[in-house]
Amino acid sequence: MTGTATEPMFRATVLTLYPEMFPGPLGLSLAGRALENGAWELETRNIRDVATDRHRTVDDTPAGGGAGMVLKPDIVAAAIDAACPEGDTRPRLLMSPRGKPLDQARVRDLGAGEGAVILCGRFEGVDERVIEARGLEEVSIGDYILSGGELGAMVLLDAVVRLLPGVMGNAESGETESFETGLLEHPHYTRPQVWEDRAIPEVLLSGDHGRIARWRLEKAQGLTRERRPDLWERYTPPQTGRKKK
Ligand code: SAH
């Protein structure tokens, strides 16, 4: 199914103060099976392991005052350097609400690469100088604040791993999914044919694949226009499809 020695493998290294959170949900279902099969590899490193003082300090108070604590640049740099041997060209990501919002295009991009080194912030965040000095790419999973980067890292890895070769049973389902086509996906139905007086749309039982495909495209376009005007704005319909209205 996956993971012959010659295939490129996706290697994820997560730098965190809470390594015991991993693999967590990534150890189950699709991602977990892929981990077992060797389609990807997960290394978790405790940032605190590089702290050498008596209290194994990783944070300090913010310069200029204010609430909370900031992860120290020397500690974060040491953790990154220990995790990335020379020649490690994997992208270095910092989970951060200030980052570029993660989208399916970036997920695809990452999945096509060798892996990623992911730094999970905690407290108020990370000293700005180490973000610059180690060229960290800030990635956000949405416009809300989590208490740490770990759940963000899991979201990102879950999205990437399901696209790796051999991981998803039905490869086609990856291509029609929401966002892949620039549209939200059409609605789904399954048996029973009538449930609580609601019938499956007749076209889906017609066996006419052309009609079904047109119906699905129309539904996807309608949903996207209604719910996500931002996506609709950027959408280019397929050549054979109807004009965008
Ligand atoms: N003070 C920061 C928030 C810190 S939250 C601010 O206002 O921007 C603590 C950590 O949680 C962050 O360093 C980051 O690693 C993670 N985090 C919080 N929200 C996130 C989001 N939307 N996407 C990705 N990571 C997030």
Image (cartoon, rainbow, N blue to C red):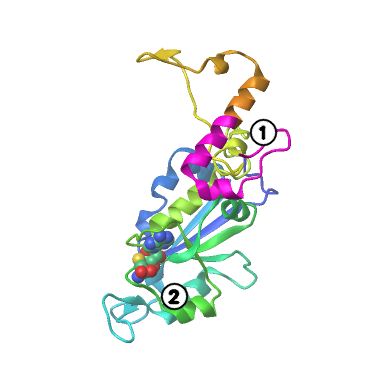
Say the numbered circle drawn on residue 76. Answer: 2
Taking the image as four quarters, which one is ligand 1 found in?
bottom left
Question: Does residue 8 sit above or below 208 in this rendering?
Answer: below
> Which labelled disc corresponds to residue 192?
none
Q: Position of residue 168 (x, y in %)?
A: 57, 37
- Give the quarter of the figure containing the N terminus: top right
- Residue 137 is situated, as x and y percent measured from the top left of the image, at 53, 68
- Residue drawn 36% across and 55% down? 21
- Callout 2 secondary element: helix
Q: Viewer-proximal residue, 17 or 158?
A: 158
> Within the image, what quadrant is residue 71 found in?
bottom left
The answer to whether residue 58 shows anywhere in this view is no
* Amino acid type indicated by mark 1: Arg
- What residue appears at the point 65 percent right and 16 percent down from the top-left corner? 208
Query: Can you tell which mark lies on residue 242?
Result: 1
Res. 26 in view: yes
The picture places residue 17, in percent across and down from the top left corner, at 36, 65
Q: The residue under label 2 is which amino acid type?
A: Val
Q: Can you give x and y, in whole percent of width and height, for residue 106 in the image?
A: 58, 55
